[in-house]
Amino acid sequence: MTIDKRFSSATDAIARARELGHLTDGITVMVGGFGLCGIPEALIAALRDSGAKDLTCVSNNAGVDDFGLGLLLQTRQIRKMVSSYVGENAEFERQFLAGELEVEFNPQGTLAERVRAGGAGIPAFYTPTGVGTVVAEGKPVQEMTFKGRTREYVMETGLWGSLALVKAWRADPFGNLQFRMTARNFNPEMATAADFTIVEVEEMVGLGDLDADNIHTPGSYIDAIVVGTPEKRIEQRTVRQP
């Protein structure tokens, strides 16, 4: 029997996650995207509408004030952000400076590796990035020799969530995914690092229609699929002077 993971709407997919116990107050949610590129727009809106609160969101950034994860900041559903860049969101800034939002900053490469490690079942790893800075405060630091060089390394833990929301270009009914250009960004890693992964896609194809050599994320990682028509906002439009 062929497994079909399609849901009729983002709301239905989010409801299924709640039904199975993967969406409750206080969970960690892994969210793909980079700026406004490759974000699961409809799934974020459905998560907002679910009313789940006290969320820890692991994402490169927090969107902008009225789009992306900024929607969840508006409704105060996010308790903590684990991110690498948050400079485009005024509400994020206000909540952070007011002590209303907990923030765990990561160097961008470290964040990517923490998510990848979580998806690969690796609980922790050592990296020289951040040694001697606030990034390393409260974390184990160890001197090690690697490739003939002795230096200090800080231990970072892998990241894992109850729920992952990702965006892809195309999918087949089993959930095999293709991403398009820079919209791939953090999405493949986020898809592997959660108990229940929902993908929002622009196009569905039939089983066997995706070239096996060009499948970026295998469907075994995907639990639910929704098709959406993205708005695809441009975060900062830069044009040449006439």
Image (cartoon, helix red, strand yellow):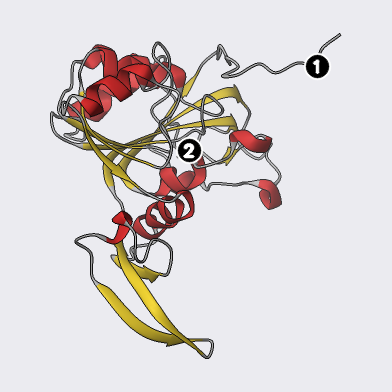
- Determine the residue positioned at 54% across, 25% down: 201
**What amino acid does circle 1 point to?**
Arg
Between residue 3 and residue 40, name the one nearer to us.
40
Q: Amino acid at mark 2?
A: Thr
Picture residue at 43% right of the left edge, 29% below the top: 87
Residue 100, x across and y down, in percent: 16, 26
Q: Position of residue 118 (x, y in %)?
A: 34, 56
Of tags 1 and 2, which is closer to the observer?
Answer: 1
Mark with earlier residue (1, 2): 2
Q: Quadrant of residue 142?
A: bottom left
Disc 1 residue crowd, few under 14, some 14–19, many 20+, Cα 10 Å: few
Percent across and percent down for residue 53 are 16, 23
The answer to whether residue 158 is visible is no
> Would residue 216 be found to the left or right of residue 128 on screen?
right
**33 to 123, vertically: above or below:** above
Q: Is residue 105 left or right of residue 234?
A: left
Closest to the observer, 201 or 136? 136
What residue would you read off at disc 1? 240
Give the quarter of the image for residue 202: top right
181 with respect to 110 (left or right):
right
Numbered circle sitting on residue 2: 2
Residue 74 spot, x, y in % from top left: 27, 13
Give the CA distance from mark 1 to mark 2.
Answer: 51 Å
Cβ–Cβ below 8 Å for labels 1 and 2? no
Q: Secondary structure at mark 1?
A: loop
Q: Is residue 67 above or below residue 55?
A: above
> Which mark, residue 79?
none
* Quadrant, the C terminus: top right
Determine whether the residue tagged by mark 2 lies in a helix, strand or loop.
loop
Determine which quarter of the picture holds residue 154: bottom left
